């Protein structure tokens, strides 16, 4: 499920439904492709959404790494 986007980076979650609970897994996509995010993004609680400002900060980390790589 798509929740929001920033500069073309889209924040998605999908649910892992078990008998006794439901956990969310977090993903980032751009132009239909999954984007590798910082470890902290994937380590976010499976019981809550990443907030917009947190997502923006994660995307900015990715952009900085790409800029440095040239």
Image (cartoon, rainbow, N blue to C red):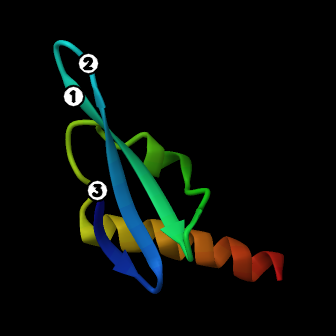
**Image coordinates for residue 16, horizontal then vertical, percent:** 32, 30
Contact (Cβ within 8 Å) of mark 1 with mark 2: yes
Contact (Cβ within 8 Å) of mark 3 with mark 1: no
Q: Is residue 49 left or right of residue 60?
A: left
Residue that appears at 27% across and 31% down: 23
- Which of 19/48 is in front? 19
Mark sitting earlier along the chain (2/3): 2
- Relative to 43, is 36 above or below? below
- Relative to 11, is 43 above or below? above
Decide: few, some or many residues near mark 2? Use Cα within 10 Å; few <14, some 14-19, many ≥20. few
* Circle 1 residue: 22
- Which of 65/5 is in front? 5
Q: Which of the 4 image quarters holds residue 24?
A: top left
- Relative to 65, is 15 above or below? above
Q: Which of the 4 image quarters holds residue 32?
A: bottom right
Mark sitting earlier along the chain (3/1): 1
Quadrant of the frame with the C terminus: bottom right
**Image coordinates for residue 50, horizontal then vertical, percent:** 28, 56
**Image coordinates for residue 60, horizontal then vertical, percent:** 51, 76
Gap in Å between the C-alphas at discs 3 and 1? 16 Å
Select label 3 or label 1 by which is in front.
Answer: 1
Q: Which mark is residue 18?
A: 2
Residue that appears at 34% across and 51% down: 13
Quadrant of the frame with the N terminus: bottom left
Gap in Å between the C-alphas at discs 1 and 2? 6 Å
* Circle 3 residue: 50
Q: Which of the 4 image quarters holds residue 17?
A: top left
Element under label 2?
loop
């Amino acid at each position: 499920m798509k929740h929001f986007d920033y500069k073309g980076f889209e924040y998605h979650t999908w649910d892992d439904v078990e008998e006794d609970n439901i956990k969310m897994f977090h993903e980032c996509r751009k132009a239909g492709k999954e984007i590798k995010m910082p470890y902290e993004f994937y380590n976010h609680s499976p019981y809550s959404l990443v907030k917009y400002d947190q997502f923006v900060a994660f995307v900015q980390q990715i952009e900085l790494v790409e800029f440095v790589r040239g």
